[in-house]
C-alpha cells in the first residue's frame, strides 16, 4: 500500500476508528493521540490501535496533538461541522495546515488521493463525527478510506 503515507487519528468511534481500521487492513502505518485511559464513547480503545495517551482525559488535548503532529487534516462529515469535528477544523486552520472537508454524500476517492499526493502529505490526520452522532458513518468512512488507499497504491 502507499509507502509514503501514515494515518493519524484519535480512536473515537465513527470516522476515527474507520480510518484506523482501513489503515490496518491496507498495511498503512498509523499513529495518534487518545485521551488518558484510552477513552472513547464505547469504552476503552483497543490496544490494536497504536495510539499514545495524552496526560488529560479530555478530548481537546488529543485533538490538538493529532492536528499538530500531521501535515494536513481530512474531515469526513456532513455539513455544518459540529462539536469535536468543528474543533478539529478550527485547530488545523489555526495551525495553518491544509484541511479537506469531504461530505459523505459527495466523496471521490480519486480526488482525495490527488489532494494527498499534490500536497505531498506524509502524515494525514483523519477526523469526523463519532458513530452516535451520525449512525452509519463508520461504514461509509471505512469504505471510502479503503478506496483512497487502493487508489494511492495504484499511482
Image (cartoon, helix red, strand yellow):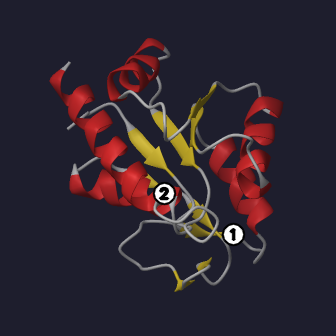
Q: Residue at x 20, y 29 (%)?
A: 153
Q: Which residue is mark 1?
A: 54
57 left or right, relative to 34: right
Secondary structure found at label 1: loop
Question: Along the line of sight, which residue is nearer the eye, 28 or 132?
Answer: 132
Q: Residue at x 44, y 46 (%)?
A: 7
41 left or right, relative to 8: right
Count numbered badges in the picture. Answer: 2
Q: Which residue is mark 2?
A: 137
> Distance from label 1 to label 2 (Cα)?
26 Å
Secondary structure found at label 2: helix
Q: Residue at x 35, y 74 (%)?
A: 48
Vertical comparison of 105 with 130: above or below: above
* Residue 56 image-quadrant placement: bottom right
Q: Mark 1, residues whose alpha carbon is within 10 Å: few (<14), some, or many (≥20)?
A: some
Question: Along the line of sight, which residue is nearer the eye, 155 or 108?
Answer: 108
Residue 118 point in image, percent of width and height: 44, 12
140 left or right, relative to 40: left
For the C terminus, the image quarter is top left
Vertical comparison of 95 with 7: above or below: above
Amino acid at each position: 500500500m502507499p509507502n509514503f503515507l501514515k494515518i493519524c487519528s484519535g480512536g473515537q468511534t465513527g470516522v476515527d476508528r474507520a480510518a484506523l481500521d482501513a489503515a490496518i487492513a491496507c498495511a498503512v502505518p498509523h499513529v495518534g493521540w487518545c485521551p488518558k485511559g484510552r477513552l472513547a464513547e464505547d469504552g476503552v480503545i483497543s490496544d490494536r490501535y497504536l495510539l499514545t495517551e495524552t496526560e488529560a482525559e479530555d478530548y481537546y488535548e488529543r485533538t490538538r496533538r493529532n492536528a499538530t503532529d500531521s501535515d494536513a487534516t481530512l474531515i469526513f462529515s456532513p455539513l455544518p461541522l459540529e462539536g469535536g469535528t468543528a474543533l478539529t477544523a478550527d485547530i488545523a486552520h489555526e495551525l495553518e495546515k491544509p484541511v479537506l472537508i469531504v461530505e459523505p454524500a459527495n466523496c471521490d476517492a480519486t480526488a482525495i488521493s490527488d489532494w494527498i499526493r499534490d500536497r505531498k502529505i506524509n502524515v494525514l490526520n483523519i477526523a469526523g463525527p463519532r458513530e452516535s452522532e451520525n449512525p452509519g458513518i463508520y461504514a461509509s468512512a471505512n469504505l471510502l478510506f479503503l478506496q483512497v488507499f487502493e487508489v494511492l497504491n495504484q499511482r
